[in-house]
Image: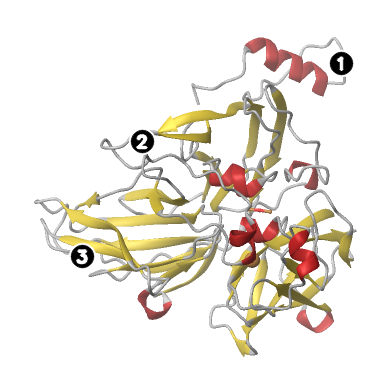
């Protein structure tokens, strides 16, 4: 990391503070924190024929810098807020200490607009694909482009030719490629959330993605949209899913050949480039049946990288050190998600800007009474009930959970997730050890649903 380092003076001041202000020089040099500036920027999302789009981004870019660390390393990031609004950074999916979780008023004060600063540092216990984004006014702040990938590499990563990230963004733009600023309107909030009209891969509409026959790719997909759900089909290819939400899963072909990602969800794919040199193969998103579109083309170079594809066995990633829940002794709770259009949503709620509930309560941002109290170290089984006509990706902070069953049927892979996508009227049973002390957010990651009631706090103590 050569760019974005703190000045030497900042670093020394920090080191002295850490040493309890003693006038003893710090003995061991620690790597300096990486400076990350939340700021305004201008990005050619749509391409050269349109004006650039004004965005909010980390380092003024979309996505923000890809942060890469090794498993077990300590992340140190100094967030400098140059935006005209308060913000925070949440490190989505990381099992970190509560004080580093980036939830305003719950775990830290907001980082003030126009110059506020906050130092994040914590150890990264798990390898995998994660991401970072604000947790204040999120429909607007994520909707304007504040997000980036956080990649934690395994000590011995599987052999691939390229390891890369596709961050999927979704934007509501007008004819001049300008953001439509109707964030948080009740129409979006009470339906599927703010679904835009422009899907980007790593901050731009892409015609094609170049690859060479015979290559093996590790493709890390991150859904950074506030509301859009993707169902990606790689025509002419058979990717293997090897990790979900960062955590290894038994390698498998995606169901019905579609990689389905709700907001905030990730999938690591092993994609063998088995197409013909010179060929093009579309990647199609057909999650919304009336809005099927081509995300981009996989476009093959004229010459192959090697004959036949890498073809070797599909790598099985080593499990992360997540404690296994003890189902026989687990504490059990039912959590019901309600509200939304065509559901039991009262007019009074709508007038108050609320549309959704968790166990009957619509919670506002900054309101943080815990609705569930879990004993530290206890195993927990939650029965999540989606009593609405809408999809909800439900996210728990500070922990990962196994998905045991859906609608009463055991899941095939008992996958570890931090965000589980519930279909309309679906139920899912999840299990985890309440291992991480603190107050943790538990909310829908359709950010317009979160901010109109579908959030709650779980206390682990
Ligand atoms: Cu990705 Cu509470 O957030
Ligand atoms: Cu939701």
Circle 3 crowding by C-alpha within 10 Å: few under 14, some 14–19, many from 20: many
SS at mark 1 in the image:
loop
Q: CA distance from mark 1 to mark 2?
A: 47 Å
Q: Is residue 365 above or below residue 15?
A: below
Which mark is in front, 2 or 3?
2
Q: Does any portion of residue 59 appear in the rendered image?
A: no
Instruction: Name the foreground residue: 415 vs 72.
Output: 415
Circle 1 crowding by C-alpha within 10 Å: few under 14, some 14–19, many from 20: few
Q: Residue at x 32, y 62 (%)?
A: 271
Position in image of residue 280 (x %, y %): 17, 59
The quadrant of the rendered image in which ligand 2 is seen is bottom right
SS at mark 3 in the image:
loop
Which mark is in front, 1 or 2?
2
Circle 2 crowding by C-alpha within 10 Å: few under 14, some 14–19, many from 20: some
Position in image of residue 85 (x %, y %): 67, 32
Q: How is the image coloured?
A: secondary structure
Residue receiving disc 3:
274
Instruction: Name the foreground residue: 5 vs 170.
Output: 170
Instruction: Name the foreground residue: 238 vs 283.
Output: 283
| Residue 300 image-quadrant placement | bottom left
Labels 1 and 3: the sequence-earlier one = 1
In the rendered structure, the answer to whether residue 309 lies left or right of residue 254 reads: left
Residue receiving disc 2:
44
**Image quadrant in which the C terminus is located:** bottom right
Q: CA distance from mark 2 to mark 3?
A: 32 Å
Q: Residue at x 67, y 20 (%)?
A: 29
Labels 1 and 2: the sequence-earlier one = 1
| Residue 217 image-quadrant placement | bottom left
Q: Is residue 2 above or below residue 270?
A: above
Residue receiving disc 1:
21
């Amino acid at each position: 990391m050569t760019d974005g380092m703190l000045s030497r003076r900042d670093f020394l001041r920090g080191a002295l503070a850490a040493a309890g202000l003693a006038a003893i020089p710090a003995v061991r040099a620690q790597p300096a924190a990486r400076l990350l500036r939340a700021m305004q920027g201008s990005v050619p999302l749509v391409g050269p024929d349109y004006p650039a789009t004004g965005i909010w981004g980390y380092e003024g870019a979309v996505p923000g810098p890809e942060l890469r660390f090794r498993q077990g390393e300590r992340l140190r990031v100094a967030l400098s807020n140059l935006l005209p609004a308060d913000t925070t950074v949440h490190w989505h999916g990381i099992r970190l200490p509560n004080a580093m979780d980036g939830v305003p008023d719950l775990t830290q004060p907001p980082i003030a607009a126009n110059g506020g600063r906050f130092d994040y540092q914590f150890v990264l216990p798990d390898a995998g694909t994660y991401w970072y984004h604000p947790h204040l006014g999120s429909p607007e702040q994520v909707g304007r482009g504040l997000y980036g990938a956080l990649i934690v590499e395994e000590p011995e990563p599987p052999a691939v030719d390229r390891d890369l990230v596709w961050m999927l963004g979704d934007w509501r733009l007008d004819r001049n490629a300008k953001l439509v600023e109707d964030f948080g309107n009740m129409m979006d909030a009470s339906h599927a959330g703010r679904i835009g009209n422009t899907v980007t891969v790593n901050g731009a509409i892409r015609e094609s993605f170049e690859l060479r026959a015979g290559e093996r790719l590790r493709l890390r997909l991150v859904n950074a949209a506030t509301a859009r759900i993707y169902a990606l089909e790689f025509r002419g290819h058979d990717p293997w899913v090897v990790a979900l939400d960062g955590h290894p899963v038994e390698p498998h072909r995606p169901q019905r050949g579609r990689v389905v990602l709700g907001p905030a969800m990730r999938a690591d794919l092993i994609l063998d480039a088995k197409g013909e040199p010179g060929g093009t193969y579309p990647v199609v998103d057909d999650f919304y049946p009336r809005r099927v579109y081509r995300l981009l083309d996989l476009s093959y170079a004229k010459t192959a990288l090697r004959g036949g594809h890498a073809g070797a066995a599909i790598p099985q990633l080593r499990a992360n050190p997540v404690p296994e829940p003890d189902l026989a002794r687990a504490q059990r709770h039912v959590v019901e998600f309600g509200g939304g259009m065509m559901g039991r949503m009262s007019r009074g709620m709508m007038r108050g800007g609320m549309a959704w509930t968790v166990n009957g309560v619509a919670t506002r941002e900054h309101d943080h009474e815990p609705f569930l109290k879990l004993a530290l170290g206890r195993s927990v089984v939650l029965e999540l009930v989606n009593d609405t006509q809408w999809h909800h990706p439900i996210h728990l902070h500070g922990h990962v959970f196994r998905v045991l069953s859906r609608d009463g049927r055991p899941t095939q892979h008992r996958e570890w997730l931090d965000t589980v996508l519930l279909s309309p009227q679906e139920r899912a049973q999840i299990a985890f050890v309440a291992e991480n002390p603190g107050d943790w957010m538990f909310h829908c990651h359709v950010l317009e649903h979160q901010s109109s009631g579908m959030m709650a706090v779980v206390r682990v103590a």
